[in-house]
Image: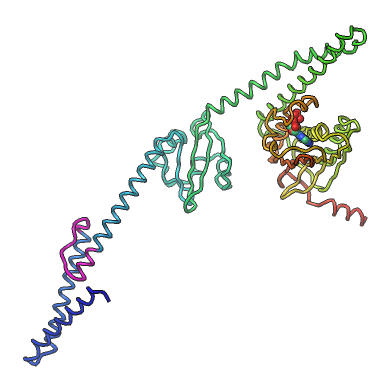
Amino acid sequence: MGRLWRRELWRLAALLAVGLLIGWPFGAIGYGLATALALYLAYQLRQLHALQEWLTHHPHDEPPAASGLWGELFDRLYRYQKGQRLTQRRLRDTLRRIQESSEAMRDSVVMLDRHGDMEWWNSAAERMLGLQPAHDRGQHITNLLRDPRFVDYFHARDYREPLTLSSPIDEQMILQFQITLYGDDERLVMARDITRLHRLEQMRRDFVANVSHELRTPLTVLAGYLETYGDMADQLPPRLGRGIVQMQSQAERMQNLVNDLLLLSRLEIDQGGQDDARLDPASLLDTVRRDAEALSAGRQRLEVSIEDVRGLLGSEKEIHSAVSNLAFNAVRYAGDDSRIVLRWRPWQDGACLEVEDDGEGIDPLHIPRLTERFYRVDKGRSTATGGTGLGLAIVKHVLLRHDARLEIDSRLGEGATFRCVFPAHRLVGDRATADSRRAGAGES
Ligand code: ADP
C-alpha cells in the first residue's frame, strides 16, 4: 500500500476516533461516528466536484490545490494531459508538413481508406484527375476513375507495374498510375503526368516506322538490279562480279533489317489489335521445323515433341514469327551436330512453346539483356550469321501481345532453352499430357 493511501486511512481513522470521543460522554457513539463519516464524505464530494469543474471548464489550467491522495491524482492527470497535448501538437505538425510537401508535389497524391474511399488529396490531383473537395471526399475512387482498366488494376491488387491511362478530364494528358498499399489495408494512389515522355516515345516509334518504310522501295530497286547483274556475274570482269555478289548479300541484310524494324514498329503501335484464332501448335511447330531444316542444311538434327493436346488462342502469323526466330537462332548459334527440339508442353498454370538446343549456350550474365534491340553476345559472330539483332525483341513484343512471357534458361557450354509461356486463358481444350495421349492410343 502506498504512503498516501496509508495517510488517508489514518486520517479516516482519526476522524472516526474524534467522533467516538465526542459521542461517548453523551452516550451517543453512533451519532458521533455517523457525523465523522458524513464529514469525511462531504470532503470527498467536494474534491470530486473540484475535479469535475476543472476537467469540464478549465482543463488547460493548473489543477485546483489539494493535498494527499487528491493532490496526487490532480497532479498525475495534469501531467498526463500535458503529455497528450504535446504528442498531439507534434503529430499535427508532422501531418501538416506531410500535407504541405505532398501539396508542393507536381504528381497527384490521393489517400484512400481501407474501403477505397478517398480521404485526402493534393491540389495536383484536382488539376490532373478533376477531384473536387466539396463533392468527392468520401467517394470511392472507382466512382471518379471509371476506366475499366483502372478498375481492374485497382481490384487486382498487383501493383508491381504502373498503369498508363489518359486523364479523366483531358484525353490528351497521359498519366501513369502507381498504387501503394500501407498501414491497415489503406492505399496511396499516385499519378504522374508523362504526356511529354509519351509523345517523345510516339515520335520515336513513328520515326523508325517511317524511315523503315521509306527505305523499303529504294532497297527493293537496288536488290532487283543487283540480282539481275548477279545472274550475269560470269560475263563480268571477276572483280566486278565479286563486288556484285557482296553488294547483293549486304542489300539482303539491309532488307531483313528494314523488315524486322517495320514488324517491330507494327507490333508496338498496334497494341492488342491482333486477331485471335485457334492455333494448332503441332502443325505450327512442324512448319517451323521444315523452315529451320532448310536453314540448317543438314548441320543439325531437328525434332518436334508435342506433350499437350490443348490448342492456343493467338495470331498465327505473329506466333509463327516468334517461334521461327527462336528456331533460326538455335540453328545459327547452337553449332554443328547439335540437337534442336521444338516442344509444346504444359508449363506451370498454362503451357509453353519451347525451343531447346544442346549447343554452346549463353553466359547467364547476358540473359537479362538479350531481348534488347541490337544486343548481341558476340557481335562479329551474329553479323556473320545474318542476324539483325532484333529477333528476340520481336519475340518479346509478340508474347506481350499474347499475355505471355519469354523465359530463357542457359549456361555456357550447356545448351539453351527459350520458352514462350502462355497463361491458361490463352489455351483451348482439356489439359492432357503426352503420356495420357500415348496411353489412350495404346488402348484403342
Ligand atoms: P541476332 O539477330 O543477333 O540473332 P537476336 O535478338 O535474335 O539477335 O539474339 C540476340 C543474341 O542472343 C544473339 O546475338 C546470340 O548471341 C544470342 N542467342 C540467341 N539464341 C541463342 C541460342 N540458341 N544459343 C546461343 N546464343 C543465342
- Does residue 390 lie above or below 26 as drawn? above
* Residue farthest left in this picture: 26
- Does residue 402 lie above or below 434 as drawn? above
Q: Position of residue 38 (x, y in %)?
A: 15, 79
Q: Position of residue 354 (x, y in %)?
A: 78, 42
Q: Which sits in the foreground, 84 or 153?
A: 84
Ligand 1 image position (quadrant): top right
Looking at the rendering, which quadrant does residue 55 occupy? bottom left
Looking at the rendering, which quadrant does residue 130 occupy? top left
- Does residue 60 lie above or below 423 as drawn? below
Q: Is residue 428 left or right of residue 159?
A: right
Q: Position of residue 97 (x, y in %)?
A: 36, 42
What residue lies at 92% left-to-right and 7% top-to-bottom?
235
Within the magenta stretch, is there residue 263? no
Q: Which residues are magenta?
A: 57-75
Q: Is residue 29 left or right of residue 430?
A: left
Tell me if residue 322 can be seen: no
